[in-house]
Image (spheres, rainbow, N blue to C red):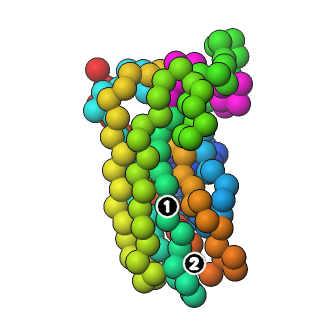
């Protein structure tokens, strides 16, 4: 069996099928691990957001990319002795950070299960590190309508 090694939205894990997803249906910001982008150009994250509806409509989906010149102490791809800083990361709505976050993509749901929303988030701001953040600002209670998300990060090397 071929195993594809790739960055998961939350943790780096092996994806034996390449079709693994993360479920988004709460107020929590789902933040990816930080990944290096310093030597990439034409950077973009391609999302496949799929609606799963038993009853109701999934909340609006907000997706954005945060940038930083330094990884945070939580970075598991590049452990010490690299310099680390949480001050480098920008937060949507909260300011802070040394670089502005990429303008969020806001995607509305149709309420039809199986509807696929292709989303592309490109950015040209130069940074050494990036991470993807996904959130629904309204919790789905009960959780009978939600988003399944797959993300692919791509770019051309310089």
* Res. 130 visible in picture: no
The quarter holding residue 88 reads top right
> Are there few (<14), some (14-19), or many (20+) residues within 10 Å of tag 1?
many
Q: Position of residue 68 (x, y in %)?
A: 53, 24
What main secondary structure does the magenta stretch of the protein show? loop
Q: In the image, which residues are magenta?
A: 67-76
Residue 62 to residue 84: above or below: below
Q: Where is residue 104 in the image (x, y as percent from the top left)?
A: 43, 46
Q: Position of residue 50 (x, y in %)?
A: 45, 70
Q: Residue 145 carries which label?
A: 2
Q: Position of residue 116 (x, y in %)?
A: 37, 71
Q: Mark 1 or mark 2, which is nearer the start of the sequence? A: 1
Helix, strand or loop at mark 2: strand
State the residue at coordinates (59%, 59%).
Answer: 137
The quarter holding residue 121 reads top left
Q: Which mark is residue 61?
A: 1
């Amino acid at each position: 069996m071929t195993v594809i090694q790739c960055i998961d939205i939350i943790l780096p894990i092996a994806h034996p099928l390449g079709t693994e997803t993360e479920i988004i249906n709460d107020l929590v910001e789902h933040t990816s691990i930080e990944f290096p982008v310093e030597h990439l150009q034409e950077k973009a994250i391609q999302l496949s957001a799929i609606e799963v509806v038993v009853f109701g409509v999934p909340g609006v989906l907000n997706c954005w990319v945060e940038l930083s010149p330094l990884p945070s102490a939580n970075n598991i791809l590049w452990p010490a002795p690299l310099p680390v800083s949480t001050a480098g990361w920008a937060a949507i709505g909260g300011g802070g950070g040394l670089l502005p976050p990429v303008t969020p993509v806001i995607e509305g749901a149709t309420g039809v299960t199986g509807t696929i929303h292709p989303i592309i988030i490109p950015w040209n701001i130069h940074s050494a590190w990036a991470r993807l953040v996904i959130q629904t600002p309204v919790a789905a209670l009960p959780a009978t309508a939600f988003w399944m998300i797959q993300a692919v990060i791509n770019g051309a090397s310089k």
